[in-house]
Amino acid sequence: MEISRDQIKQAVIEAGSSDEGFFHFPENENGLYLQQDPDEYADFVHYMATQLPPSKFSLDIGIASGGQTKFLRDYYQVEKTIVLDIGLHEAFVHWERIKPTVNTNLVLELIMDSHSKEARKALLPYQGQIDFTFIDGDHSYKGLMQDIELAKEIVKKDCIFVFHDTGAVPDCVRVFKELEKDPDFEMLANFDTRFGISVWKYLAVNGPKTGLRKKISKLLS
C-alpha cells in the first residue's frame, strides 16, 4: 500500500530535528537530526517516492548528519550512493551512527571539500553514471555554482538535481532564478513552504568539454 504524505510527515517528526526552536519539531537523541520543515520535506519525499523512477546511482553533496540521506532512501529507492561532505557541520558527529542504517549501497564516502581538486579526481571514474544528485552543501552563490559544475562532470542526461534552501537563503535563491532561465535545466517541482526544495531535470547531453571544464579535466586526468 502506498504510504501517504501525512504518514511521511509524521515519520519526519518522529525522526527528530537538529534544533527544535528553529525547525519547529523536537530533537531525538537517537534520531536523524533533520534540518527540514516537516510539511515541505514530507511533500518533497512523497513526490520523489510516487512521481519519479528509482535511482540507480546518486551523489549527495553536503549531508550534515546524514539524516536526510537516510530518510529519503527509506521511501525513494536509491541503489548506489556517493556522499561528499567536508565534515565540519556540528551535526556531522551523528553520521557514523546513522551511516549503517542508510538503505543504499554506499559506494564512496568522500569527507573533503567538494571544491577541491581531490574531490573532482575521486569522482571522475563515475562520469556518466549518476542519475540523481542532492546538493545541500556550501550555501554561497559561488560555492553552489561550483557544486553544480562538479555534478555536471559526472551525471548522465536527464539526471535529477535537487537543491535545498532555494527559497530562503539569498545566494541559493539567486541560483534558483538563474536555473529557471537555463535551457539545460527543466524544473519538475518546487516545494517552498519555508526553506525551499526544488527538483530539476538536467537536459544537457554530455559532450566534449570546453573552457574551464576542459582545463579541469586535463589537470586531473
Image (cartoon, rainbow, N blue to C red):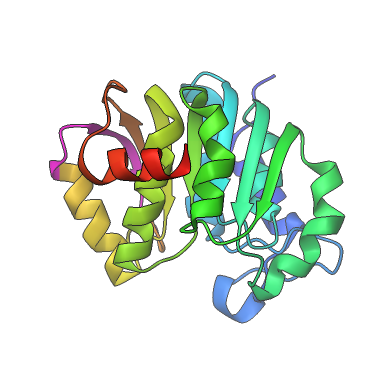
Choose between 54 and 156: the one closer to the eye.
Answer: 156
Count of picture labels: 0
Q: Where is residue 71 in the image (x, y as percent from the top left)?
A: 68, 45
Choose between 160 and 59: the one closer to the eye.
Answer: 59
Choose between 172 and 48: the one closer to the eye.
Answer: 172
Q: What stretch is highlighted in magenta?
A: 181-193
At a point 40% along the width and 61% down the height, the residue shown is 165
- Is 155 magenta? The answer is no
Q: Quadrant of residue 45?
A: top right
Q: Is residue 42 visible?
A: no
Q: Where is residue 153 in the image (x, y as percent from the top left)?
A: 40, 36
Q: Position of residue 200 (x, y in %)?
A: 34, 36
At a point 16% along the width and 40% down the height, the residue shown is 182
Q: Quadrant of residue 126?
A: top right
At a point 41% along the width and 45% down the height, the residue shown is 219
At a point 18% along the width and 51% down the height, the residue shown is 178
Quarter in which the N terminus is drawn = top right
- Seen in the image, is 147 located left or right of residue 7? left
Q: Can residue 121 be seen in this view?
A: yes
Q: In which quarter of the image is residue 168?
A: bottom left
- Seen in the image, is 130 located left or right of residue 102? left
Q: In this view, does 138 lie above or below 180?
A: below
- Seen in the image, is 138 located left or right of residue 183? right
Q: In this view, does 153 lie above or below 77?
A: below
Q: In this view, does 195 lie above or below 108?
A: below
